[in-house]
Amino acid sequence: MPKTKKHVKVAINFDVGIPEAEEAHVTLQGDEMVIDMQEPDGITKYLIVGKPVGNHFQGVNSAGPRMPKVRVKWVKLGKVFVGQWLEDGEEYLFSFKLKS
């Protein structure tokens, strides 16, 4: 069974001019990294199962058929993860840090 480590209340910072960070749970399971996030409306959910591809992770939103279609890629740079979030034809940059 793969080793699992869950990080709760991880601040996901999107580069969209909004100072508030989104809150997510990030789980490391084997070689996968899962980002589990819910919008403040309590309805919109994101469940991104990031699989390793070369030197980065990538995945799509698998929270359900009525949830936003999202493609995400991210990589670790030093102690920070940075990535690209594609949703509804719009591209957003994001970053987050995991506590040790």
Image (cartoon, rainbow, N blue to C red):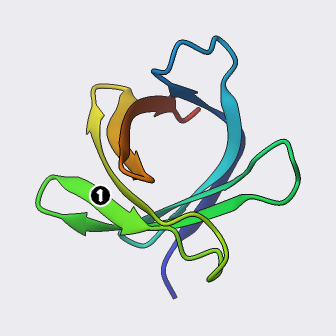
50 horizontally vs 18: left or right: left
Q: Among all residues in the image, which is located at the extreme front?
A: 89
Q: Secondary structure at mark 1?
A: strand
Q: In the image, residue 97 lies at what x, y percent?
A: 50, 30
- As shown in the figure, which amino acid type bears the numbered disc 1? Phe
2 horizontally vs 18: left or right: left
Q: Residue at x 38, y 42 (%)?
A: 90
Q: Among all residues in the image, which is located at the extreme right?
A: 42
Question: Which image quarter holds the C terminus?
Answer: top right
44 horizontally vs 63: left or right: right
Q: Residue at x 64, y 69 (%)?
A: 67
Does 89 appear above or below 30? above
Q: In the image, residue 37 lies at what x, y percent?
A: 68, 53
Does 37 appear above or below 9? below
Q: Residue at x 57, y 63 (%)?
A: 68
- Count of picture labels: 1
Q: Among all residues in the image, which is located at the extreme bottom?
A: 1
Q: Nearer the viewer, residue 30 or 92?
A: 92
Q: In the image, residue 36 lies at what x, y percent?
A: 65, 58
Q: What residue would you read off at disc 1?
A: 57
Q: Nearer the viewer, residue 21 or 32?
A: 21
For disc 1, the neighbor class at 10 Å (few under 14, some 14 to 19, many from 20) is many
Does 84 appear above or below 51? above
User: Would you identify the image quadrant in which residue 79 lies?
Assistant: top left
Q: In the image, residue 25 lies at what x, y percent?
A: 68, 51
Q: Residue at x 68, y 45 (%)?
A: 24
Q: Nearer the viewer, residue 27 or 35?
A: 35
